[in-house]
């Protein structure tokens, strides 16, 4: 059984203590969070975030810190290098996020490869190579940057395993790079996720399973290949519970963190129930009505 968790918050007044408590309340044994608002660059200093207390709580509950994941803010775009000021800002903000990730005691940062915005995938590849090389030369951490597989919405890059494999093959700091496989995104990108085993074999063939550091487990509101990126609760979307459950019990993912990014149901977080169903393997068709 893999490590199971979900996206959790980080907010005043409890900060990291609250983050850990939220994860524990869902019976999660891992989790993912943003170190600040994902849509802006304002960041509270680490000294204000109650990190040591949060880490003490983790160790008290036996949560393995090496499974914890930070998500980089999605305003960072290294896929287009046209405007030097914007590109520089993205690089320096990412350097800061890598240092913050390390400051939380975490070792994995999930990053969207970016968008080429008006160019093509080739331009996106060259931009990302250039941008991340400068970041890795200067951040001074050993945090693994986990490039997320994208749905192909708009001008997103990093949609195919082949793109990520080419990036890694050409990147001078390849030992710093991992991959985050998002089931909704790869489904929307056109891969068949209904057969987890075949998908993971394909991943292994192109990228090698050692590169797989994080799985984002989400159902999708749209059919395969739709390039939309709209997450759905487990069992409600076009992937279905059974197919998603295969990832949780697959031997190749035993040691990897699996993170839910499914939507809240009205005012209620679905994660405790979704995690319980994944652990038991038993799906309840009307589970959202009993949260
Ligand atoms: Fe993401
Ligand atoms: Fe994701
Ligand atoms: Zn998504």
Image (cartoon, rainbow, N blue to C red):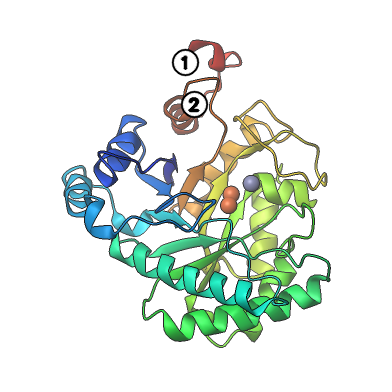
Find out whether the residues at labels 2 and 1 contact each other: C-beta distance under 8 Å. yes
Q: Which of 96 and 5 is in front in this view?
A: 96
Q: In this view, does 210 lie to the left or right of 84?
A: left
Residue holding disc 2:
270
- Please tell me how crowded label 1 is: few (under 14), some (14-19), or many (20+) other residues with Cα within 10 Å: few
Residue 191 is situated, as x and y percent measured from the top left of the image, at 76, 52
Where residue 263 sits, quadrant-wise, is: top right
Residue depicted at 43% across the width and 28% down the height:
276
Q: Is residue 195 above or below residue 66?
A: above
Residue holding disc 1:
291
Residue depicted at 62% across the width and 71% down the height:
86
Q: Nearer the viewer, residue 168 or 249?
A: 168
Residue 32 is situated, as x and y percent measured from the top left of the image, at 43, 48
Q: In this view, does 75 lie to the left or right of 5?
A: right
Where residue 224 sits, quadrant-wise, is: top right
Local secondary structure at mark 1: loop
Local secondary structure at mark 2: loop
Q: Which of 66 and 46 is in front in this view?
A: 46
Q: In this view, does 150 lie above or below 269?
A: below
Residue 132 is situated, as x and y percent measured from the top left of the image, at 56, 78
Judge: label 2 CB < 8 Å from ligand 2. no
- Locate the N terminus and report the quarter of the image it occupies: top left
Marks 2/1: CA–CA distance: 7 Å
Residue depicted at 78% across the width and 77% down the height:
123
């Amino acid at each position: 059984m893999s490590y199971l968790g979900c996206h959790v918050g980080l907010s005043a007044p409890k900060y990291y203590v609250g983050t850990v408590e939220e994860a524990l309340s869902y019976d999660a044994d891992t989790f993912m969070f943003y170190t600040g608002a994902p849509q802006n660059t304002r960041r509270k200093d680490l000294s204000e975030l109650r990190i040591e207390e949060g880490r003490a709580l983790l160790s008290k509950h036996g949560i393995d810190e090496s499974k914890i994941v930070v998500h980089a803010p999605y305003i960072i775009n290294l896929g287009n290098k046209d405007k030097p000021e914007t590109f520089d800002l993205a690089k320096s903000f990412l350097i800061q996020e890598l240092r913050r990730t390390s400051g939380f005691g975490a070792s994995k940062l999930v990053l969207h490869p970016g968008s080429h915005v008006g160019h093509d995938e080739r331009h996106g590849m060259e931009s990302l190579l250039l941008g991340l090389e400068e970041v890795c030369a200067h951040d001074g951490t050993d945090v693994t940057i986990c490039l997320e597989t994208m749905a192909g919405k708009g001008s997103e890059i990093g949609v195919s395993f082949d793109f990520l494999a080419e990036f890694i093959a050409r990147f001078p700091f390849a030992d710093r790079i991992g991959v985050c496989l998002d089931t909704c995104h790869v489904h929307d990108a056109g891969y068949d996720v209904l057969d987890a085993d075949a998908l993971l074999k394909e991943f292994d063939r192109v990228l090698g399973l050692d590169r797989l550091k994080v799985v984002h487990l989400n159902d999708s509101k749209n059919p395969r290949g739709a390039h939309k990126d709209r997450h759905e609760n487990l069992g409600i979307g076009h992937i279905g519970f059974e197919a998603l459950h295969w990832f949780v019990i697959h031997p190749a993912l035993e040691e990897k963190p699996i993170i839910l990014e499914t939507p809240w149901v009205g005012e209620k977080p679905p994660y405790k129930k979704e995690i319980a169903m994944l652990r038991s393997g038993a799906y309840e068709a009307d589970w959202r009505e009993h949260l």
